[in-house]
Image: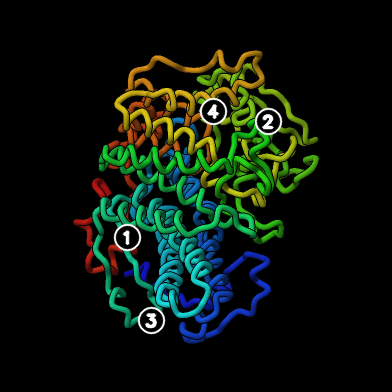
Amino acid sequence: MKNIKIIAITISLSLMFCNCEELLEEEPFSVVAPSVIFGNPDNIEIAVAGIYNAMSQRGIDGNTFGNYAHGLIMMGMLGTDHVRSGNNLGNRFSQMDLFNYSATSQLPTHVWNLHYIGINRANTVIVNTEPLLGTGLDDDRLNSLLGEAKFMRALMYLNLVRFYGDVPLKLTETNSLTAEDVIGIARTPSEQVYQQIADDLIFAAEHLPRQQELDGRVTSGAAYGLLAKTYVYWATAPLNDTSKWQLAADAARQVIDSGQYRLLDNFPDIFGWQNEGNDEIIFTVKYGSVEGQWGVLGGAGGFLGFSGANFNSTGPVTGQATQVRQYAAEQYLWESWDPLDQRRDWTVPAARINNAGDIVPLTADQSSDPNSFNFGLAKFRRDASWIRFQSPIDVPILRYADVLLLFAEATANASGGATAESYDAINQVRRRAYNQQPDPTAFDISGLGLSEFNEAVIEERGRELVLECQSRWHDLVRYGILGERLEAVKRSQSLDNFDESKHILFPIPLTELDVNPLINEADQNPGY
């Protein structure tokens, strides 16, 4: 099994990869017996940091494009009605938008591999820490560390099951080639994967603290928020288990009633280089301030430059360099947005940045040409600077606005129609979006049937969460509307390759099929 080979990593390797600066003050281990490592809770804490690292770092064991560092972001943004890439069928990023990816494509392969690296690190912590409960160590601390490991395992499985469908559910560690599961694990039915995700998150919610000393580590609020999201996805396609709507509402209510989070008054204030002290952010994948510990969100999601802009600068732009053109907004996204909604001009500005570092409005010709690649996605930016490709901007995984919208959707569907709570939740988000207008309440929605309300929630999520948590692709897939939304927006190069029966899932990597005897070509997702 290819991913087993990749994730046959000892705790020592996990520690070597850890980029949590405070935790790196600890001495790394070499080859030490697990009983020695895990007998000290401080060492368990370092091992937990290695799980976080698998979500943030790229280049682990040859997987260059990372998870939230690159690959996962591209898989979840491109190929939607909001974001586009170029027309080069051979480009790894354009492949996502042109529906030209296959079982050998780098991004879906690297995301698969890195998720199982992270899952193995989580499993190593869990299976070696659980036996220590009741042995005289600090059980509260052990359970909190277990909660972090189980949250991260749940997050990784939630990503996998949404992108790939049935996936191997591995709950044991692999630390040698004699492990029972090294030969292979068959694809596990999605419902069973979802149940394990829920079980892990329920444990995490019950044992994690409300606040963590080190920013960027998960809390009980993050666990309840991700549990709400898990149940919402479980309640919609492909499983459509409507019994999960009320569970989703209950989990989201835990976050709302905790009083720990709020919508910031001003939408642009949410985003920036660091998120410490941000009352709206519930959980992010963290990036350090030192080059080499950076992600791509600021650079890839900043202002587009005019031809010749130097993307290697965080100040005034000088010199000459080829402009980065990984992705841009579909022109439709800007045109369909209410200009009174302050999120539009912050997220998809009709402007570019010139060599002096100045923001220059698009001309009428530039803003009306659907093939001009002119609308950048500048949601994550600093001032008017065009941030270089690598940047220390944290990747938001869950924030309060997301939970409010999940709560609105869940309460409406659990009740068979939108309730007063449903409307209040979505309208809180809308009022913040229109808070530059004299009366934000004038933009409240009301009086909708259930299907209309669900559509309003999905569109509100689309406007609120551009570039975040792969939400647009997943939302269109789970409501079965990916094809119809793309048909109205995408250029012919994308539509010619798109097949909705195929492209609602990504392919199981060929490397997995080649070496796992329990997954073969007949088990591949349809169409690949």
Q: Give the label, 2 or 4, closer to the camera.
A: 4
Mark 1 lies on residue: 510
Mark 2 → mark 3, Cα distance in angstroms: 52 Å
Depicted 35 relative to depicted 87: above or below = below
Q: Residue at x 33, y 65 (%)?
A: 170
Secondary structure of residue under mark 3: loop
Decide which of 115, 82 is in the foreground and name it.
115
Placement of the N terminus among the 4 image quadrants: bottom left
Decide which of 114, 23 is in the foreground and name it.
23
Q: Is residue 6 visible?
A: no
Residue 429: mark: 4
Which amino acid type is shown beneath numbered disc 2? Arg
Q: Few, some or many C-alpha atoms within 10 Å of disc 4 (few <14, some 14-19, many ≥20)?
A: many
Mark 2 lies on residue: 352
Residue 176: mark: 3
Which amino acid type is shown beneath numbered disc 1? Leu
Q: Residue at x 53, y 68 (%)?
A: 141
Whether residues under marks 3 and 1 lie with C-beta atoms below 8 angstroms apart, the answer is: no
Q: Is residue 265 visible?
A: yes
Secondary structure of residue under mark 4: helix
Decide which of 171, 61 is in the foreground and name it.
171
Mark 4 → mark 3, Cα distance in angstroms: 50 Å
Mark 1 → mark 4, Cα distance in angstroms: 42 Å
